[in-house]
Image (tube, rainbow, N blue to C red):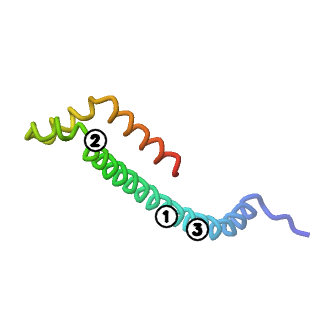
Amino acid sequence: MERESIGRIFLRHLAMAIPWGIVFLVIFGIATLTIKQNIKEGIEYTSNTLASKAIRVIYENKMMNKEIYGKTDLRETVKTLLKDPRIREEIEDLLEAIQKER
């Protein structure tokens, strides 16, 4: 019985491992792309939900009649509204609810 050299054994096992490595890389690449797309969709959904709920809170707030119509700059209006502790608390509650939904 002839003994195989270590180099020949190594090359034979390397040749058997290469196809499995390629299969692994393909599956890993597909999984990565899928997860990446799901993360993007989750971030987009969260930002859209937060923006729509925050706008709804601002418009439903009684403070709107007092503060918003007196100001013309939307940025200043939002800053003023966010200083109100009631609105800040409602937005924090909305963020917690969004995190619990995940």
Q: Is residue 53 left or right of residue 93?
A: left
Give the answer, above or below, for where 35 lies relative to 81. below
Nearer the viewer's eye, disc 1 or disc 3? 1
Q: Are marks 1 and 2 in contact (CB under 8 Å)?
A: no
Element at badge 3?
helix
What is the distance, in whole Å, between disc 1 and disc 3 at their CAs?
18 Å
The residue type indicated by label 1 comes to Thr
Residue at 7%, 41% in the rendered image: 72
Give the answer, above or below, for where 30 lies relative to 64. below
Name the foreground residue: 48 vs 4: 48
The mark nearer the N terminus, 2 or 3, is 3
Which numbered tag is attached to residue 19? none
Nearer the viewer's eye, disc 1 or disc 2? 2
The mark nearer the N terminus, 1 or 2, is 1
Name the foreground residue: 30 vs 42: 42
Residue at 10%, 37% in the rendered image: 71
- Determine which residue is flagged by label 3: 22
Q: Are marks 2 and 3 in contact (CB under 8 Å)?
A: no
The residue type indicated by label 2 comes to Asn
Give the answer, above or below, for where 19 lies relative to 92. below
Residue at 16%, 35% in the rendered image: 67
Quadrant in which the N terminus is drawn: bottom right
The mark nearer the N terminus, 1 or 3, is 3
Element at badge 1?
helix
Circle 3 crowding by C-alpha within 10 Å: few under 14, some 14–19, many from 20:
few
- Determine which residue is flagged by label 1: 34
Name the foreground residue: 75 vs 88: 88
The residue type indicated by label 3 comes to Ile
In which quadrant of the rendered view does residue 40 lie? bottom left
- Determine which residue is flagged by label 2: 61
Q: Is residue 71 left or right of residue 49?
A: left
Name the foreground residue: 64 vs 73: 64
